[in-house]
Amino acid sequence: MVSGLFSDTLSIMGLLITCDQCGVALADGRTCQDDFHQLLFWEGENPEFWQVHHLTVLCFHLQHPNLYSEEGLAGAKKLLVDFVEMGVSTDEIRKRDRQKLDSGSRDWNIKGDASSRGRYLHPVTWTITARDIVRGGKQHYVANVRKWADSVVESLRDSGNS
Ligand SMILES: [Zn+2]
């Protein structure tokens, strides 16, 4: 006979809800979007956090690929590698992409919609998510976001999606 404690544990496991995009376990009704908003809120409060804002946005969206169109996802993957591995600055990207991203001369959308949603060909296991950055607190925010960005590049490469 199954003890009361054991069957309770099983039923809790059976009800475990995970994010269908990044796979994180959603406890207490808290969503990934809630975590993302928490990070943006901290950035709003702390001007020194703005230096990693572009990484926060890219990492979160790359871990929720259906927020992008297929073309948007491909561009975002390349952009994160440019930042993390090529050491390209946000100013350089702005100059480089000004013409390309000008909506007048662009014939595709960055954001996902019914006609095109980004997805990965191979399943990805993320080692750091927005939830971990929230848990890490404000104290090491900039360093933690940089680690997050490194881990996203690595996870995409390891899974054969880069
Ligand atoms: Zn998620």
Image: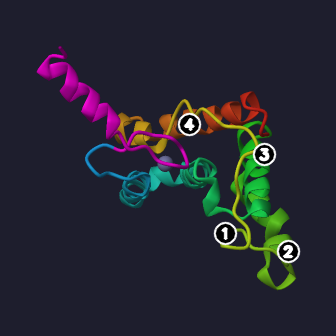
Q: Confirm whether the magenta stretch covers residue 137.
A: no
Q: Considering only order in the chain, which callout, 4 or 2, is on the residue closer to the N terminus? A: 2
Is the C-beta separation of discs 2 and 4 under 8 Å?
no
- Label 3 or label 1, whichever lies nearer to me, is 1
For mark 2, what is the residue? 99
For mark 3, what is the residue? 82
Residue reaching furthest bottom? Answer: 104
Identity, as a three-letter code, of the amino acid under mark 4: Trp
For mark 1, what is the residue? 111
Residue reaching furthest front? Answer: 1
Q: Nearer the viewer, residue 55 or 68?
A: 68
Q: In what element is the residue under mark 2?
A: helix
Q: In what element is the residue under mark 3?
A: helix
Is the C-beta separation of discs 3 and 2 under 8 Å?
no
For mark 4, what is the residue? 148
Identity, as a three-letter code, of the amino acid under mark 3: Asp
Q: In what element is the residue under mark 1?
A: loop
- Label 1 or label 2, whichever lies nearer to me, is 1
* Residue 90, percent from left and from top: 70, 56
Q: Is the image coloured rainbow, by chain, by secondary structure, or in one colour? A: rainbow
Residue at (62, 32) in percent of width and height: 151
Q: Which stretch is magenta?
A: 1-26
